[in-house]
Amino acid sequence: MSQRFRTSRRALAAAAATAALTLTLGACGSGSGHGSGMDHSAMPSASASAPGDDMASMPGMEPVSAGNGLAAAKDGYKVTSTAATVPAGKAAAYRFAITGPDGKPVTGFAVDQTQRMHFYAIHSDLTGFQHLHPTMAGDGTWTAPLAALQPGTWRLYASFTPDSGAGKGKGFVLSRTVKVSGMAMTSSLPKASGTATVDGYTVAVKGDPMAGMGHRLTATVTKDGKPVTDLQPYLDTYAHLTAFHQGDLAFAHLHPETEVDGDHGGPTLSFHAEFAQSGNWRMFLQFQTGGKLHTASLTLHVG
């Protein structure tokens, strides 16, 4: 009898331990921790908010802007051009227009960072970056003065904000591709790195961007190991940042946050960055000192 009692007591203890372990694992599964190899998304807690609610309420976690700059038309607006090719090895005037929902050329544009139109050119291998500010004729035709392009495929982006009509106040980035005749030579994308050097300056970029949400990036400029504090205003900011995705050349939305106060900007600058997808992005940081514009380039990996 005594033996049977001890056996039953051991069985009850084992059952209690098993139940306790089950409760413990259940608590872990409904928590916010991220254990290796565990799927915490299968059983969301009853108190979980709707998708995106938490991100929208957290600083630096705003939803990413719509669009990636790869379309020639969006919401009735379209970038048009009769030029499908551009000559190689010499400067060329690329002419284009922006048409609105009514099919007519748009002539009213809002000023953004001192310009009514920002125009970018990038080779398919993410080399040859150009950032231009074209001029517009009275009929709505824009002319971008492209520097000599190397043979291959180039994507040309028009960044603008209509000042009237259905799209008034909304920013657009539309693009088209052009071919440059000749034998195309491609370069491998440099590995991801947080630093770049240009004209004796070193630029260090920090941040942990994730695709599909807004994050802050900081860029610090030094020279000979010393902080640079004489950055001059360029396009109403101390630095202009542009990025393109490896492979499809998607355009990233990067906005300066540092306020301009005379010719003594730096050494640290901040940007609101939105990357539509993960992978490697080629970044181009433009800043000005002593009246000279510098363009530093580096590869950033986005998770």
Image (cartoon, helix red, strand yellow):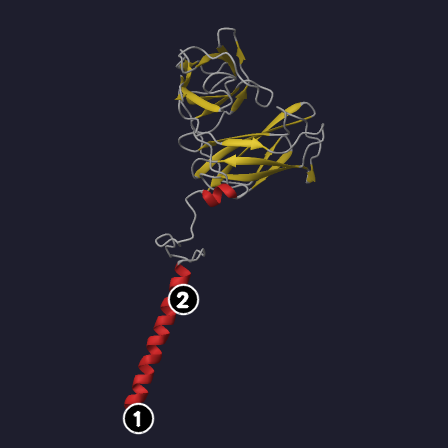
Quadrant of image for the C terminus = top left
Quarter of the image where one finds residue 267: top right
Asked if residue 117 is positioned above or below residue 41 in the image, the reply reads: above
The residue at 70%/25% (across/down) is 290
Name the amino acid, label 1. Ser
Residue 300, percent from left and from top: 50, 38
Residue 85: image location, x then y, percent: 40, 14
Q: Earlier in the sequence, mark 1 or mark 2?
A: 1
Decide which of 161, 178 is in the foreground and name it. Answer: 161
Q: Quadrant of the N terminus?
A: bottom left
Q: Which residue is mark 2?
A: 24
Q: Secondary structure at mark 2?
A: helix
Amino acid type of the residue tagged 2 in the rendering: Thr
Residue 209 at least partly seen: no
- Residue 2, labelled with which disc? 1
Furthest residue to the front? Answer: 47
Distance in Å between CA atoms under marks 1 and 2: 33 Å
Residue 82's spot in the image, x, y percent? 40, 11
| Number of disc labels | 2
